Image (cartoon, rainbow, N blue to C red):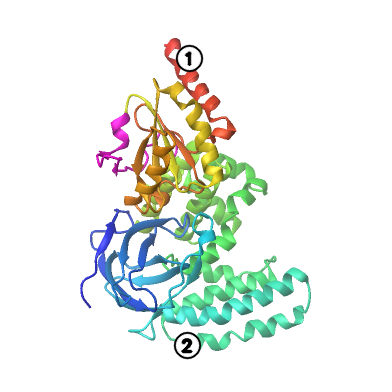
Amino acid sequence: MRSLKIIFSLFLLFPLISSLAQPVIIKGNGEGYAGAKLAFYRQSDPVSRKLIPLFITECNEKGEFQTEIPVKSIELVYIKSGIYRFLLLVREGHTYELKLPAYNPMPPEEENNPFFAGITVIPEVVNNPGDINNLIRTFDAEYNTVFNRVSERVDKDVRKDEIPGLIESLNKLTGYSDDPFFRDFVKYRTIMLNLVAWGEYPGRREDSVLINQKFVPENPAYTDLLEQLYENSFKLLSAGPLKKEFAGAVNNSSPSEIMKILTREGKVVNPLLQQYVILMNTYYGYFSGLLKEENALAIFDSLHTGGKNEYICNLALILKQNATALAPGTFPPPFYLPDSSGRMVTAGDFQGKFLLLVFIKETDYASLSELALLKSWISNFKDNVILAAVITGKNYRDMLSYFRKRGYDWLFLDGTVNPFLADLYDLRIYPSFMLLDREGRIAVRYCPSPSENLEGFLKSILEKESRKIISR
């Protein structure tokens, strides 16, 4: 296979990947993939499940591709192409030759839907029939069917006498392989199924003992189970018999005090598992408002420097970074985008004034209505605000021409040169509006749209700034 062109690269350094990471080779082909683009992502961690963009590879005329990714131990890699989102569990130093299902393009009606995740598929690894991905794909085909049938009987409270037989039908699946990783995967998935079937009840200790025996965050079945069991631990503690002790531990931002409370409760006794549960609930509590921001960040910092092992220390840092990404006061992801003349532009070029970033993808009626309203008054802010419209649609030149003919004299930047811009800026609706302050930091992550009184919103920010200057 000849070398294939990587048309965009955005390798980032993350704490869970050390300098000792070994390359993983991923190659393969599929019907209809000639010239198709495959976007590669790495899952940053099993708590936030954030996908970190890596690069885009273009298949050759035969629908073939090949690339490398540095990996330490075991990681989850996602590959997006067309309607599919391929999920691959990779081990460092291994080669994966994939047989992809026939290419299926994204439906036109879903192209601009940021909430459409696509169909998740585990691809076939043809160079190793006993590969863990093949084992999981075969297992899930039967497990998911049983899980859905059991869930239906529990939800509707019907034919529950059939549940034991449904669960026992999975016993044969454990014989697929002696791979310890796969056997653990089956064990944790079975515990999840039992929890759905029978729920939790006083005195049930078997599952808890199994979970606490060893800490295996590299196994997705284990971390999925932990989420099912413990994602509401802080919420339950804050309302339970240990609520006073828990409130004091949180106010002290003390993981060690929280660990003692978890030990007393008895469900989580493994120290590594305790710290994972603390990090998971701190991350969720940060966004739900259950924890004060300063307490949550202090807990992350404490476990980053004092975690029980390297994994916990690194996870604490990653979760803090993911929680605070795009937060007010932080610098946005750097961009280097060409304007209409080809000059490269960065956010730092506009320091001294507020920068209103407007992300545009389409020229549909809703978008044009918002932009026309913005056009009618934005010049009133020219002394304090610069507007930069970032076009992320398919054809920058055509859209630029469209807006120029209609009298838009804005600064238009070509966002199509960075296919991961929507991922980096977490763009979910279009047009989307973000405001940077005079130093280039994020002032407001999601501004109201023009129809929601963006004009008044900007006025209030400038008035607030003026009051601060006067008070000095």
Task: Identify the amino acid type marked 1.
Answer: Arg
Residue underneath mark 1: 467
Direction from residue 19 to residue 363 in the image, left or right = right
Which image quarter holds the N terminus?
Answer: bottom left
Magenta region, mostly helix, strand or loop? Answer: loop
* Residue situated in front as seen by the camera: 347 or 181: 347
* Residue situated in front as seen by the camera: 302 or 158: 158
Judged from this view, the residue extending furthest toward the right is 158
Secondary structure of residue under mark 1: helix
* Residue situated in front as seen by the camera: 318 or 248: 318
Note whether 444 is above or below 262 in the view shown: above
Residue 60 in the image: state x and y as whole percent: 28, 72
Note whether 47 is above or below 317 in the view shown: below
Where residue 298 sits, quadrant-wise, is top left
Give neighbour class at mark 2: few <14, some 14-19, many 20+ (Cα, 10 Å). some
The residue segment tinted magenta is: 326-350
Secondary structure of residue under mark 2: helix
Q: Is residue 225 magenta?
A: no
Direction from residue 205 to residue 418 in the image, left or right = left
The residue that appears at 54% across and 44% down in the rendered structure is 287
The residue that appears at 26% across and 68% down in the rendered structure is 68
Residue 80 in the image: state x and y as whole percent: 41, 65
Question: Can you see residue 317?
Answer: no
Task: Identify the amino acid type marked 2.
Answer: Tyr
Which image quarter holds the C terminus?
Answer: top left
Residue underneath mark 2: 176
Note whether 51 is above or below 351 in the view shown: below
Direction from residue 268 to residue 414 in the image, left or right = left
Q: CA distance from mark 1 to mark 2?
A: 70 Å
The residue that appears at 44% across and 55% down in the rendered structure is 50
